[in-house]
Image (spheres, grey):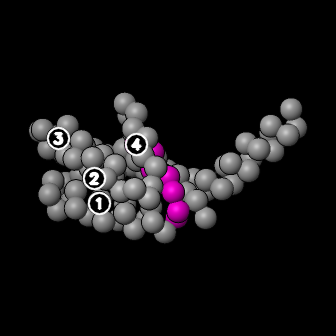
Amino acid sequence: MQVMVELSLYPLVGEYIEPIQQFIDRLNSYGNIGVLTTSTSTQVSGDYGHVMSILGKEMQRTHEEVGQAIFVAKFLNYDAMQANKQARKTEA
């Protein structure tokens, strides 16, 4: 099963850009997930188990290094999303 997670990170520190960039850089270091960064969030996609394992590890690391940080996430069943797209194309 494939998942897409849209994440926003809010480090509760004065210098917040560096922890965000470090988190994104660490996500980009993994070859088995897709990472797309926009101005307000980062989308991570791939195998459900891989994505969840990586996010758990990297979110924990961020909390250990930064202290207080807020993660806001949306989890989407990517398989179902792609199937819905395909169905709409077929109907058109």
The amino acid sitting under disc 4 is Thr
| Start-end of magenta stretch | 42-48
The amino acid sitting under disc 1 is Glu
Quick one: SS at disc 2?
helix
Do the residues bearing badges 4 and 3 touch, measured as CB atoms within 8 Å? no
C-alpha gap between disc 4 and disc 1: 13 Å
Residue bearing mark 3: 18
Do the residues bearing badges 4 and 1 touch, measured as CB atoms within 8 Å? no
C-alpha gap between disc 2 and disc 1: 7 Å
Q: Residues within 10 Å of mark 3 (few under 14, many from 20)?
A: few
| In the image, farthest residue toward the front | 31
Q: Which mark is residue 26?
A: 2
Quick one: SS at disc 4?
strand
Nearer-N-terminus badge (1/3): 3
Q: Is label 2 or label 1 in front?
A: 2
Nearer-N-terminus badge (4/2): 2
Residue bearing mark 4: 42
Question: Quadrant location of the N terminus?
Answer: bottom right
Quick one: SS at disc 3?
helix
Nearer-N-terminus badge (2/1): 2
The amino acid sitting under disc 2 is Arg
Q: Is label 2 or label 3 in front?
A: 2
Q: Is residue 40 above or below residue 64?
A: above
Residue bearing mark 1: 58
Is the stretch drawn in magenta largely helix, strand or loop? strand
Question: Quadrant location of the C terminus?
Answer: top right
